[in-house]
Image (cartoon, rainbow, N blue to C red):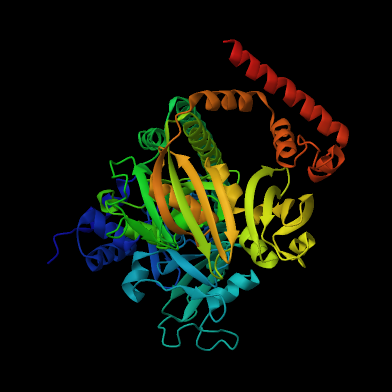
């Protein structure tokens, strides 16, 4: 015998703020803590007594409520109670609409909609499916507990080949009394136990769906109320989209503000690093300053300087912020090198900034760099070339903990830093070579088909001996080389050099029969000597004869033989080392005057003065005229005279000023 009395069930209705609010048997059972069947029996008994009124809702649902008076007829003939129930339902739909309008996300709207369909419309097997742009399915977002009990977790419905998908495509609601007998019903699951189905479109968002295991479960009232609810849900979803767009715009503005603030800090860091380079006296100090400043900031984990190795196709590490040895022993393979191709090698070869995120798995350098395992989480890597004009000194490698680090603006800042570091290294090399007491001198040879040197090809073509006396750079892509040619056969003409691919033009300055002095316009891309000079080296001797070329070149004392040989091989990949030595260059008086002259002359004045000297303009008799010299430099004669006059005044002023002191 149940201990629950009908009065207990009636008390549940009386305890409500609004006693006439309808309740279902499960709701009364939950309030009493008894079985649903027990609650249902008490409700039926109360209905028979006239204490409660009842109405079927949906296919299998039923609600009970307190009538206006306990002795009133449950179903009066004039239908006033039915009108009251309809008004109550509309009021609750209105209340649900307010809740929908307060929901700010698709998920929140979907939960309110399904709860309203179950509680207010009496649709216990209902759910909501949403569509993502570009997808070909409708994904379930909310589903009643009764639906999970009956069918398990809801599936995703294809837009093509399902009733739900058809309603979404056509944008019109569908009510099926029995989906197994409808001729135009495309059933997604032929084995489904569902019979009746009510599907409402929600615009471009998706559908609201109600199902029943019985046939003819839905009447016109269900359709009417369902359409009202669906319209409100669609409006709420539109509002949620608008709110999300506003939130997205706000997040984007905040991200841009944060990015701008970060970029300003990074630019300040780069500027501070550039300013610190002024006090660096050697290349090692320059590199250490750059690495320490970057790694010591809040943005980057570490920084390193790498360069080409003496072996073709290898990259070695010069220095790093984490205390790595300068010989690169803690990086890469056992010999301290990193095999190509890598983003590092690409940056050096193509002279472009490279950015790689570790999570992409495309950076073999990350696998070869020891110590990366000490930093957890994804990281990003930027490689910026260190170059000045046509000379590449290596690359700066910077790591950041954020895989999305290094924005376009940040990359531009590092590109500028790379150019400045290259310029400072080049200036330091020139200063050390000019003012240092010692220099590293290398002697190399070029031979064979891989010896890509224009003077060697020219000597073979003339069947003689060529010595390069000096070179003068121009503003364009041409380098003017002055050469002496000897030991040529009688039937050979200097114009034969015009057939050499690297030579654009040849002018004879002196022709003594068995000795010529020539002015050769050489393409800068083929002028390897110019690349070494740009690095800060001094070319002492260049000779080519009998298929063999010999080059003697001096580098600053701060350059190791390995570094110097790497520069030579960058200009001439087939070069073979013959000798290396440290030579004394302690004649400071000449060096000091030359430095002061170089400081006072402009580039154009220096070019004109050097070209005039090498071309024999100051010889007697002159080996070239001013017009010819101006033509070689691609300037007007009057301009040449102006450059030479200004250069003469500065040169003489410097020399006499030094003598007077």
Is any part of residue 239 visible from this angle? no
Q: Which residue is pictured at 41% across the width and 79% down the height?
A: 213
Quarter occupied by the C terminus: top right
x then y, percent, for residue 328: 32, 50
**Residue nearest the viewer, comparing 356 with 90:** 356
Image: 398 above or below 110: above
Asked which quadrant contains residue 167, the reply is: bottom right
Q: Which residue is pictured at 81% across the width and 38% down the height?
A: 621
x then y, percent, for residue 629: 81, 41
Say left or right for 496 vs 421.
right
Say left or right for 203 vs 625.
left
Q: Which residue is pictured at 58% across the width and 48% down the height?
A: 531
**Residue nearest the viewer, comparing 164 with 9:** 164
x then y, percent, for residue 488: 70, 62
Say left or right for 76 vs 531.
left
Is any part of residue 44 visible from this angle? yes
Asked which quadrant contains residue 135, the reply is: bottom right
Image: 536 above or below 207: above
x then y, percent, for residue 77: 51, 63
Asked which quadrant contains residue 311, the reply is: bottom left
**Residue nearest the viewer, comparing 16 with 426:** 426
Number of numbered discs visible in the structure rendering: 0
Quarter occupied by the N terminus: bottom left
Image: 228 above or below 479: below
Query: Which residue is outermost to the top?
Result: 661
**Residue nearest the viewer, comparing 298 with 342:** 342
């Amino acid at each position: 015998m149940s201990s629950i009395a009908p009065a207990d069930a009636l008390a549940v209705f009386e305890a409500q703020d609004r006693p006439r609010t309808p309740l279902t048997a499960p709701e009364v059972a939950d309030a009493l803590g008894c079985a649903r069947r027990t609650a249902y029996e008490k409700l039926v008994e109360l209905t028979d007594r006239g204490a409660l009124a009842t109405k079927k809702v949906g296919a299998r649902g039923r609600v009970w409520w307190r009538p206006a008076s306990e002795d009133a007829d449950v179903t009066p003939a004039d239908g006033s109670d039915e009108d009251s129930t309809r008004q109550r339902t509309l009021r609750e739909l209105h209340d649900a609409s307010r809740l929908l309008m307060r929901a700010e996300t698709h998920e929140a709207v979907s939960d309110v909609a399904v709860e309203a369909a179950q509680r207010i419309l009496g649709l216990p097997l209902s759910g909501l499916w949403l569509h993502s742009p570009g997808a070909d399915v409708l994904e379930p977002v909310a589903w009643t507990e009764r639906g999970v009990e009956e069918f398990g977790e809801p599936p995703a419905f294809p837009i093509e080949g399902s009733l739900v998908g058809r309603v979404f495509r056509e944008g019109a609601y569908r009510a099926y009394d029995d989906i197994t007998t409808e001729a135009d019903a495309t059933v997604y699951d032929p084995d489904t136990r569902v019979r009746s189905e009510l599907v409402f479109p929600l615009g471009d968002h998706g559908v609201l769906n109600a199902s029943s295991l019985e046939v003819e479960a839905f009447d016109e009232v269900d359709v009417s109320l369902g359409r009202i609810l669906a319209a409100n849900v669609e409006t709420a979803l539109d509002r949620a989209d608008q709110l999300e767009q506003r939130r997205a715009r706000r997040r984007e503005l905040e991200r841009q503000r944060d990015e701008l603030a970060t970029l300003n800090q990074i630019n300040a860091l780069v500027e501070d690093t550039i300013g610190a380079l002024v006090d660096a006296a050697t290349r090692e100090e320059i590199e250490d300053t750059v690495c320490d400043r970057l790694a010591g900031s809040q943005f980057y984990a570490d920084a390193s300087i790498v360069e080409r190795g003496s072996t073709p196709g290898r990259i070695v590490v010069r220095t790093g912020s984490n205390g790595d040895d300068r010989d690169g022993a803690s990086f890469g393979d056992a010999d301290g090198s990193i095999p190509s191709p890598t983003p590092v090698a690409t940056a050096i070869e193509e002279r472009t900034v490279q950015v790689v995120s570790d999570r992409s798995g495309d950076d073999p350098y990350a696998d070869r760099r020891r110590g990366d395992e000490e930093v957890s989480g994804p990281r990003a890597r930027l490689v910026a070339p260190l170059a000045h004009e046509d000379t590449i000194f290596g690359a700066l490698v910077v790591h950041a903990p954020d895989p999305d680090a290094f924005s376009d603006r940040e990359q531009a800042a590092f590109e500028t830093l790379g150019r400045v570091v290259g310029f400072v290294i080049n200036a330091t090399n020139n200063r050390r070579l000019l003012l240092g007491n010692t220099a590293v001198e290398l002697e190399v040879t070029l031979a064979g088909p891989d010896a890509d040197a224009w003077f060697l090809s020219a000597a073979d073509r003339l069947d003689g001996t060529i010595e390069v006396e000096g070179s003068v750079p121009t503003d364009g892509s041409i380098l003017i080389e002055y050469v002496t040619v000897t030991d040529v056969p009688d039937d050979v003409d200097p114009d034969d050099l015009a057939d050499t691919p690297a030579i654009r033009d040849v002018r004879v300055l002196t022709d003594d029969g068995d000795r010529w002095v020539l002015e050769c316009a050489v393409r800068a891309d083929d002028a390897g000597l110019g690349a070494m000079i740009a690095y800060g080296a001094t070319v002492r001797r260049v000779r080519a004869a009998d298929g063999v070329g010999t080059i003697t070149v001096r580098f600053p004392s701060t350059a190791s033989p390995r570094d110097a040989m790497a520069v030579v091989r960058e200009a001439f990949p087939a070069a073979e080392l013959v000798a290396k030595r440290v030579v004394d260059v302690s004649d400071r008086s000449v060096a000091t005057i030359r430095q002061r002259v170089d400081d006072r002359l402009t580039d154009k004045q220096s070019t004109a003065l050097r070209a005039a000297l090498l071309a024999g303009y100051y010889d007697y008799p002159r080996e070239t005229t001013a017009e010819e010299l101006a033509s070689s430099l691609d300037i007007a004669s009057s301009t040449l005279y102006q450059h030479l006059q200004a250069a003469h005044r500065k040169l003489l002023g410097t020399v006499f000023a030094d003598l007077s002191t």
